[in-house]
């Protein structure tokens, strides 16, 4: 039986309210299930139980079994067959990954033999990975989908992978992700908060707006304008519901010309005023408007 999840009742969550697809989830497949998937982001899978076969790119009917850790690269069509009832832990990855502050995916790419990039391997779960999944899965099944919690769990997974696998194995395993797209992605994350418009961000990246938009959509899957608005909304929601900053401070931080402008944006984006949003998210009664 799942524990009662009080966080959904006591704390507002922008990502839950928007019903976003979580970055970590559990998927169950019945015996005999066959399917085809179009992968629109890099996906890491941990097979919690079951077995089957998977085909993508030049790999045909690759056996998959309990304990396997697989990487499915972006822009890939995957076909699968389930031979035994299966449960899969699915992680949606970003192009830019750091195993720790001093060890990035790009560092692996720089040191990798080019011949190794044509290979494909599955990593194997060890006792540390098993302990990690046993603590994570019940939280997911309870419905805990907080973006910040899931981001931390992905970081924890990469610490464990770094600690218990050789650089050589990690290099081959992650090679499908190691492209120049990771640099572009890292640039966007490092600079988007200081750019008010797509044009400003494109200029920082030394692209025309058209060229920037084309590459952005290829990597992120949505237009740059849509993504920037979504990030601002999520960050604004966090500042209002999770900090004690005044609405004047928050408005200034996000470039709103007045408290009225901030209030209008919140009503359009969240359906309520900043003060109502704060009351809903924190349970506090004070009105800072």
Image (tube, rainbow, N blue to C red):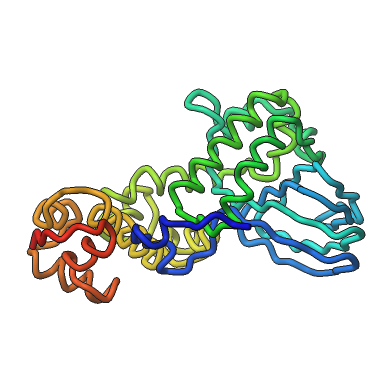
| Quarter placement of the C terminus | bottom left
Q: As displayed, is residue 172 above or below residue 42?
A: above
Q: Is residue 160 left or right of residue 282?
A: right
85 up-or-down from 190: above or below:
below
Q: Residue at x 56, y 35 (%)?
A: 156
Instruction: Give the image quarter of residue 225.
Output: bottom left
Residue in view at x 69 percent, y 30 percent: 128
Q: Position of residue 131 (x, y in %)?
A: 67, 35
**Picture mark count:** 0
Q: Which residue shows up at 11% across the image and 53% down it?
A: 246
> Which of 204/264 is in front?
264
Q: Is residue 90 left or right of residue 208?
A: right
Residue 38: image location, x then y, percent = 70, 66
Can see residue 209? no
Left or right: residue 241 versus residue 123 is: left
Nearest the viewer among 264 and 103 is 264
Give me the residue at 22% from left, 48% from top.
243
Q: Position of residue 283 (x, y in %)?
A: 24, 59
- Residue 61 in view, yes or no: yes
> Residue 217 placed where, x, y %?
50, 63
Toward which corner of the image does residue 122 lie, by quadrant?
top right
Quarter occupied by the N terminus: bottom right
Q: Is residue 283 left or right of residue 104?
A: left
């Amino acid at each position: 039986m799942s524990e009662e999840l009080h966080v959904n009742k006591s704390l507002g969550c922008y990502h839950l309210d928007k019903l976003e697809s979580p970055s970590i989830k559990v998927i169950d497949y019945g015996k005999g299930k066959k399917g085809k998937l179009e992968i629109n982001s890099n996906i890491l899978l941990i097979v919690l139980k079951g077995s089957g076969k998977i085909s993508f790119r030049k790999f045909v009917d690759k056996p998959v079994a309990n304990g396997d850790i697989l990487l499915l690269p972006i822009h890939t069509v995957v076909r699968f067959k389930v031979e035994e009832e299966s449960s899969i832990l699915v992680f949606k990855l970003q192009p830019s990954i750091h195993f720790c502050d001093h060890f990035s995916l790009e560092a692996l790419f720089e040191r990798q033999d080019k011949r190794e990039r044509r290979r494909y391997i599955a990593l194997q779960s060890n006792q540390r990975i098993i302990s990690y999944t046993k603590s994570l899965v019940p939280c997911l099944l309870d419905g805990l989908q907080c973006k910040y919690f899931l981001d931390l769990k992905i970081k924890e997974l990469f610490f464990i992978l770094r600690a218990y696998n050789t650089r050589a194995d990690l290099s081959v395993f992650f090679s499908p992700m190691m492209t120049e797209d990771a640099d572009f992605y890292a640039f966007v994350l490092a600079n988007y908060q200081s750019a008010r418009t797509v044009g400003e961000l494109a200029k920082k990246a030394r692209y025309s707006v058209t060229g920037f938009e084309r590459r952005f959509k290829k990597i992120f899957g949505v237009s740059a304008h849509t993504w920037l608005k979504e990030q601002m909304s999520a960050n604004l929601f966090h500042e209002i519901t999770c900090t004690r900053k005044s609405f004047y401070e928050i408005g200034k931080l996000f470039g709103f010309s007045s408290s009225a402008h901030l209030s209008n944006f919140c009503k359009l984006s969240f359906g309520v005023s900043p003060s109502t949003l704060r009351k809903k998210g924190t349970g506090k009664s004070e009105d800072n408007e």
